[in-house]
Image: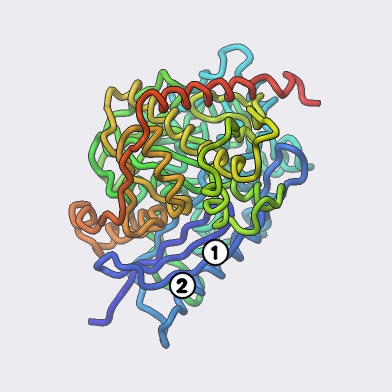
Amino acid sequence: MSESFVLAIDQGTTGTTALLLDRAGTLRGRGYAELPQHFPRPGWVEHDGGEIWTSVLQAVRRALKGPRTRQPALAAIGVTNQRETTVVWDRFTGEPVGNAIVWQDTRTDQICRDLSADAGRDRFRASTGLPLATYFSGPKVVWILDNIPGARARAEAGELLFGTIDTWIIWNLTGGVDGGLHITDVTNASRTLLMDLATLDWAPDIVAALGIPASMLPEIRSSSEVYGEARLAFVAGVPVAGDLGDQQAGLFGQSCFDAGDAKNTYGTGNFLLLNTGTEPVRSDHGLVTTVGYKLGDAPAVYALEGSIAIAGALVQWLRDNLRLIDSAAEVEELARSVDDNGGCYFVPAFSGLFAPYWRDDARGVIVGLTRFVEGGHIARATLEATAFQGREMVDAMEADSGVTLHELRVGGGMVKNELLMQFQADILGIPIIRPSLTETTAIGAAYAAGLAVGFWPSTEVLRAKWVEDKRWLPQMDEATRERELAQWKKAVTRTFDWVDAEPV
């Protein structure tokens, strides 16, 4: 029998990665294509839908080529994606009506304020698990319908489709205008502010309240089942069988299959998820309730999530905007050139503050500056910002769930930064554990697809494939930890109320 593989497509905020995994769970091929972001106005973050699809094609071709002389046999394809990013396109031409609005974008702040005017930010939380915030997809759809000329009329005439990026990829992958599947999975749907957590279907009252034509919405499916077959020439006939939002895919790829298991992914943003089992846990401490995954006909597994908008993106900002470093990898060396942050704290509220504050009015600050502070201190404060935000999410998660974390599994691009990982262990006071394969979002998508076609027989088999690479133990004393955390919280308060109630 010839060797076969599962292909995972991980479409992220700054690029697309494609991985090939064999039955042993070994990485056998990798392709990557960078994706430009567009910033037309302050607070606006966009992607070009065509550029997204091009990056997918490039990454897949590079993964399939690898060192092989012939096309590898594929058993299944899994997709994972930046979750809340919203694209609206013409079902007959396949052309987007405008650029995709990225999850970090804050242009819908007034829409969210209007929707929350009478019942507050938690107007839809009982059904969706989410606050009214610029982060989520529903308000982004409203903005497109209200601001792109002719979009609302076309949508009401049944000409337009909405999707998060998984939907856009799967539609194109399975035929596009020629019969492409218009679907999403429960994890991505749970990030739209439009899905009822209990029914796992669109909430008609919320869809109506936002004024979104129901004909635009994709069909909601499980995270692991055969949806259909790819129709692109180089992957034609391969089952498309896995679909997870990137952070839920990270949970799955870290083998967090039991209630109480948690992971943190350090990418463009920073996302902590805790498996809470088959019953949703409501948050009273600024977290969101979301779907963790759903395997075929099995009950859905839920999660509590803490979401941070800016993590790795802050390092990119140092490189691209301040030109303090020439490459992201240099930030650790620069940060190690000093012994501490020099009293400098950097709160990266570029897109407002997500969990646990949910302040759309916040903007980024660097505080504690003196003549003593130099580039190394700012680089160190940049890394520490990610870890401080991680601590706040863990505190909220323990308060909501009653679960005390004794260790934390980590993944994503930033886990290569050992100074950051040590500081994360220090400020949390628990071990941080990095697996041997750190691209856990793509691995999770591969696992979901492979399970659906019997490539792997069970989650227990997948659990055995998780291998520890390195762990960091806390070295900071409790008094220092509490003092640093208090200074950070003081810095956070300086970000509040920067944006006026009405846009200027």
Left or right: 499 as drawn, with respect to 189: right
Which labelled disc corresponds to residue 466? none
Quadrant in which the N terminus is drawn: bottom left
Q: Which residue occupies the foreground of this view, 474 or 3?
A: 474
Numbered disc in front, either 2 or 1: 2
Give the Cα separation between the discs numbered 2 and 1: 11 Å
Asked if the residues shown at circle 2 and circle 1 are in contact, with their CB atoms under 8 angstroms apart, the answer is: no
Q: Secondary structure at mark 1?
A: helix
Q: Residue at x 42, y 35 (%)?
A: 201
Q: Say if residue 419 shows up in the picture.
A: yes
Amino acid type at mark 2: Ala
- Residue 174's x, y, as percent? 49, 63
Label 2 vs 1, first from the N-terminus: 1
Quadrant in which the C terminus is drawn: top right
Q: Tell me if residue 324 comes above or below residue 450 in the rendering.
A: above
Q: Which residue occupies the foreground of this view, 201 or 307?
A: 307
Residue assigned mark 1 = 56
Q: Tell me if residue 180 comes above or below residue 366 in the rendering.
A: below
Q: Tell me if residue 123 comes above or below residue 145 in the rendering.
A: above
Q: Which residue occupies the foreground of this view, 469 or 68?
A: 469
Q: Residue at x 59, y 54 (%)?
A: 14
Q: Secondary structure at mark 2?
A: helix
- Residue 413's x, y, as percent? 47, 54
- Residue 300's x, y, as percent? 30, 38
